[in-house]
Image (cartoon, rainbow, N blue to C red):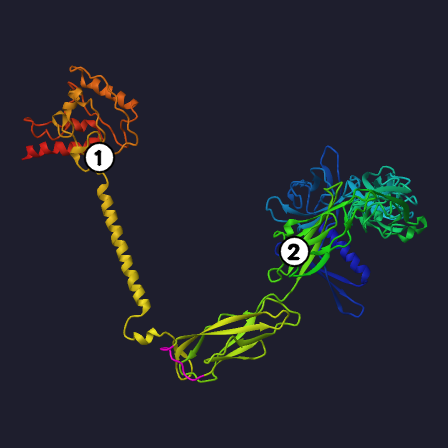
Amino acid sequence: MTIKRVLLLLLLWMWLLHPCSTEMLFRWTPDLKPKSFVGHALGSDGKVLHRQKRGWMWNQFFLLEEYTGSDYQYVGKLHSDQDKGDGSLKYILSGDGAGTLFIIDEKTGDIHATRRIDREEKAFYTLRAQAINRKTLRPVEPESEFVIKIHDINDNEPTFPEEIYTASVPEMSVVGTSVVQVTATDADDPSYGNSARVIYSILQGQPYFSVEPETGIIRTALPNMNRENREQYQVVIQAKDMGGQMGGLSGTTTVNITLTDVNDNPPRFPQNTIHLRISESSPIGTAIGSVKATDADTGKNAEVEYRIIDGDGTDMFDIVTQKDTQEGIITVRKPLDYETRRLYTLKVEAENTHVDPRFYYLGPFKDTTIVKISVEDVDEPPVFSRSSYLFEVHEDIELGTIIGTVMARDPDSASSSIRFSLDRHTDLDRIFNIHSGNGSIYTSKPLDREISQWHNLSVIAAEINNPKDTTRVPVYVRILDVNDNAPQFAVFYDTFVCENARAGQLIQTISAVDKDDPLGGQKFFFSLAAVNPNFTVQDNEDNTARILTRRNGFSRHEISTYLLPVVISDNDYPIQSSTGTLTIRVCACDSRGNMQSCNAEALLLPAGLSTGALIAILLCIVILLVIVVLFAALKRQRKKEPLILSKEDIRDNIVSYNDEGGGEEDTQAFDIGTLRNPAAIEDKKLRRDIIPETLFVPRRTPSAPDNTDVRDFINQRLKEHDTDPSAPPYDSLATYAYEGNDSIAESLSSLESGTTEGDQNYDYLREWGPRFNKLAEMYGGGESDKEAS
């Protein structure tokens, strides 16, 4: 379509809408692209009408997807009225896929697609076309935009997002109960034909389930599906496009459906009667056994609660529901006795705790069973008549007095005799004893309430036929008080009286204590043992008394201390009394009665030294004497210690170091003549520096001949010392430093180097390596100095 044709069609449309005279005016942009045109028309009223042209669009091209031909697929043709067919025009294509997916013939304007196109990848392409002069490259037509739309074909099957679905539905659901919805998608164009219209159908899972064709909702198709019969179902759903018609593409998915449990089964006991056994000696709380009712349901729908609803042992036994095992545990509630009752019968009920009202018609959701419990006889230990005993006895009873009796019996039918004994761990002092035959407890030592008011005993009862089977019972013995202790001063009183005291002056308040504990409480009376001219006692009648002076003035020079006997008595029967003596010192006091000094010596020696100072001086003198004696003893002991300080008296011992010998000519350090005359040392001498612990008899060895070499002599002496236990070393070193005859080694001593007539050459020291460089410099440097001088 050319520009002229488009303008002609536009004018025709305007004329049909406005039948009036028309005048056209074209306006071109500088780039020769027709942006718009303005039309002028005269209306019926004579006014000029103006209309603005809208943007010009090419018609759409349509292209079929998935082209399978061997040649390029033809799309359409562009042609300009300016094209004379002489090849002067050139068509250019730009936009989506231009030059790669879509190509245009520059001369003819034919557009082709170079490869197969998939609509699901892209549904349309927007391109722009233009015709230009081949020589001047100037456009002869404005650039036009057009769209290539891809036509869909049914080339995609419906697909499910999941290959396998998992769903559940309660058992016993009504027909039509929704289970799950599955949805398939089709990539084809839903607006073009039926390529994307999906219909669902069920391939596997009938007659239990069905599926809605349009929505894909799976529903139950059978009533009362029971989980206990079958729990798992596998359903295969097909999704087919083209509305499910023949030739449509399809996809499938699998749905695993599980029937969930509901409480539609009551509990059931597998047995009508259950037999259990229990020993009569079992303590309270002992588990006898368990009962269990089975329930075909699972989870909370199978939870059961157990209880005892009837029987002759409802007060003797309990039942507890074990939540993890869903069992009923029967336990002992009260003590059992074979001799009293040997068989109990219980009626136990099991009931569901979560009942669904919808299934009441399947009930009742409970069941009962009979439990028979047999009590077995055992050899029981003795049983005391009481759980504990309390005996009270006065502390003044005679030895051997019976304070009480415990009683026990054998609960078994055999009724064996009982033997009693005391647990000595509860009576370590052995104050009590018990008669083994009748259980009478009596005293074996005197009692004293003031030492121990309570005695907690443990009595053991055992059968004579079975001594290992024992029973214990606590026995509490309370010692009752008897007035057998006299009252005494409560504390020690440090009493003084002032020299300037007046008659009737209070100098001390006293009180008393008593170890006894009478029922009426303590009551004490105070009095003087004899009339005293200096002091008196005044009873306050509240278990205290006051000490008062009877005259004016006291003197330390005459009497420094007074002793005042005070009689203290109680009011219990028999009356107990004691005499306590108060020591009253005479002290110097100030005008207010405050004590200043109570020592008589302070008046006699006012300017001298006190007793404490004299004692301190004596102690210092004694310490100095002890130090002097110790120092003298240590000095005397040091003189007795053997010390080897002389270098000439070293003999075989090395006690000095860094002392270089003078060779064979040095006879001061070692007597070489002794080595050359072995006969001179046959008599062994004891070491003078140490005292051997054991004295061995010296062994005589044959004397070596006069011409014997010294080396042989030394070897012989070495063997003797190796085998002689009395020989050195005694923490010392025995040496024989004799070089031997005709030694080829020359003296290494530097002492003789000064006596040699010729000069020594020490150049060879430099050839010994870096370790001798310092030595070479010391000796080599002297020669160089001489040469330099």
Q: Is residue 139 above or below residue 605?
A: above
Q: Residues within 10 Å of mark 2 (few under 14, many from 20)?
A: some
Q: Which residue is mark 1?
A: 655
- Residue at the far right in the pictured view: 361
> Seen in the image, is 556 located left or right of residue 571?
left
Q: CA distance from mark 1 to mark 2?
A: 85 Å
Q: Residue 784's spot in the image, x, y percent?
A: 9, 33
Q: What's the residue at 21%, 19% (across, down)?
A: 713
Q: Residue 373's spot in the image, x, y percent?
A: 86, 44
| Nearer to us: label 1 or label 2 | 2
Q: Is residue 758 above or below residue 36?
A: above
Which one is in front, 53 or 574? 574
Q: Which residue is mark 2?
A: 399
Residue 253's tag is none
Q: From the image, give the main secondary structure of the stretch colored magenta.
A: loop
Q: Amino acid at mark 1?
A: Val
Region of the chain picked out in magenta, as a range: 551-558
Which one is in front, 298 or 471? 471
As for residue 553 lying within the magenta part, the answer is yes
Q: Residue 660's spot in the image, x, y percent?
A: 17, 31
